């Protein structure tokens, strides 16, 4: 990965102050299992032949990760490689040599989407965490979040994305998709992911969020009745599902009489809180609050990569703590 640096990059390396971006990229340099992820993509990556020689796979993989971490479009990623020295050094690129343009970056993303490699990367990262003894899988926490999608019809097709849908949450309507996740109760690492339209009920995806070895499951009130479902009622699992908000409010009107059930709900909520950590990372830290691409396939690939990288960030947080 070592290339000869330009004078500008050499001068940049001599500076003393380290920015937050540089610190984050330095952590990812050591944490991400680059070789294992590269092995997943390598069979599908173009080989040198008669045409233009492809960029090194490791360079394109790191560019793709930068896109996810900083929520950059393909043209914005190209601009960032020219403008931000820390990103060039992270990808082993230099200004005195060609920089991948936005079409090359887009083609790499399409390669991952076309071959379902986002899902394979997610599974490979989880296998790595399981082998390291980090992902224990004793219990599962379930939840889902809505990802907004553009609702405008001012596009070439003249219509909204047909694979997205609208749903009502509270008193607000949302148009987009929904990410359903299963999270390890001890570490808060995501082990299961399903992507659906926003109007899909949480219970319909519940069985796909279980890995099969959990002893207990915690979930919010949206999953009430999960233990009565035909495909789940025979599972030897302790179900801990939160009461509906209306019932909890009724209990709080008489706190002395209902002290025990109220404390049980607080206990459920405190354990279930870890399921929100992956959502915080991909939405607040990575900036993925609105779908950029049309169709569930492209967005599922992006979400799989995002949650794989979120697991690695979460491991970094655990190590620093």
Image: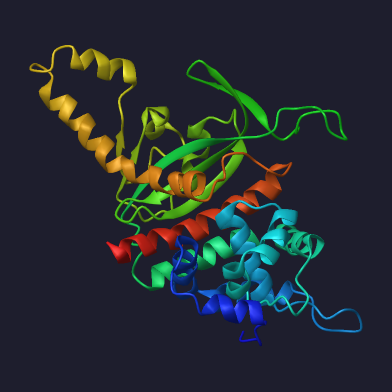
Q: Nearer the viewer, residue 43 or 204?
A: 43
Left or right, 161 with respect to 158, comes to: left
What is the number of callouts on the image?
A: 0
Left or right, 11 with respect to 107, comes to: left
Location of residue 32 in the rendering, given as x and y in whole percent from the top left corner: 49, 70
The residue at the point 19 percent across, 17 percent down is 252
Position of residue 77 relative to residue 177, above or below, is below
Location of residue 69 in the rendering, given as x and y in whole percent from the top left corner: 55, 57
Left or right, 185 with respect to 87, comes to: left
Quadrant location of residue 98? bottom right
Position of residue 109 relative to residue 293, above or below, is below
The residue at the point 75 percent across, 33 percent down is 161
Q: Quadrant of the C terminus?
A: bottom left
Outermost residue on the left side: it is 256
Instruction: Report if residue 227 is visible in the image.
Output: yes
Quadrant location of residue 228? top left
Location of residue 30 in the rendering, given as x and y in whole percent from the top left corner: 45, 75
Q: Nearer the viewer, residue 31 or 16?
A: 16
The residue at the point 9 percent across, 16 percent down is 257
What colour scheme does the image use?
A: rainbow
Outermost residue on the right side: it is 50
The residue at the point 30 percent across, 65 percent down is 320
Location of residue 17 in the rendering, given as x and y in whole percent from the top left corner: 43, 69
Instruction: Report if residue 92 is visible in the image.
Output: no
Q: Quadrant of the N terminus?
A: bottom right
Q: Nearer the viewer, residue 321 or 243?
A: 321
């Amino acid at each position: 990965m070592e290339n000869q640096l330009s004078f500008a990059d050499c001068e940049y390396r001599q500076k003393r102050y380290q920015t937050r971006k540089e610190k984050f990229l330095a952590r990812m340099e050591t944490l991400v299992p680059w070789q294992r992820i590269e092995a997943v993509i390598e069979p599908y990556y173009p080989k040198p032949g008669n045409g233009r020689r492809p960029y090194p796979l490791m360079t394109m993989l790191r560019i793709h990760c930068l896109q996810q971490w900083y929520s950059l479009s393909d043209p914005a990623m190209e601009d960032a490689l020219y403008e931000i020295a820390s990103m060039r050094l992270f990808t082993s690129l230099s200004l005195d040599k060609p920089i991948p343009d936005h079409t090359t970056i887009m083609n790499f993303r399409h390669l991952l989407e076309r071959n379902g490699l986002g899902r394979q990367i997610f599974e490979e990262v989880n296998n790595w965490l399981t082998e390291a003894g980090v992902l224990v899988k004793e219990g599962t926490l379930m939840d889902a979040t809505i990802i907004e999608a553009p609702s405008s019809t001012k596009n070439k097709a003249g219509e909204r994305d047909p694979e997205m849908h609208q749903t009502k949450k509270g008193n607000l309507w949302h148009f987009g998709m929904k990410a359903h996740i299963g999270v390890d109760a001890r570490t808060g690492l995501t082990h299961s992911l399903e992507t659906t339209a926003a109007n899909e009920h949480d219970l319909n995806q519940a069985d796909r969020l279980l890995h099969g070895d959990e002893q207990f499951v915690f979930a919010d009130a949206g999953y009430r009745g999960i233990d009565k479902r035909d495909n789940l009622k025979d599972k030897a699992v302790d179900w801990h599902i939160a009461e509906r908000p209306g019932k909890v409010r009724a209990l709080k009107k008489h706190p002395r009489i209902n002290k025990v059930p109220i404390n049980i709900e607080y206990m459920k909520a405190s354990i279930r809180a870890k399921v929100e950590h992956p959502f915080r990372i991909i939405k607040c830290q990575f900036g993925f609050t609105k779908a950029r691409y049309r169709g569930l396939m492209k967005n599922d690939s992006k979400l799989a990569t995002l949650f794989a990288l979120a697991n690695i960030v979460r491991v970094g947080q655990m190590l620093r703590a």
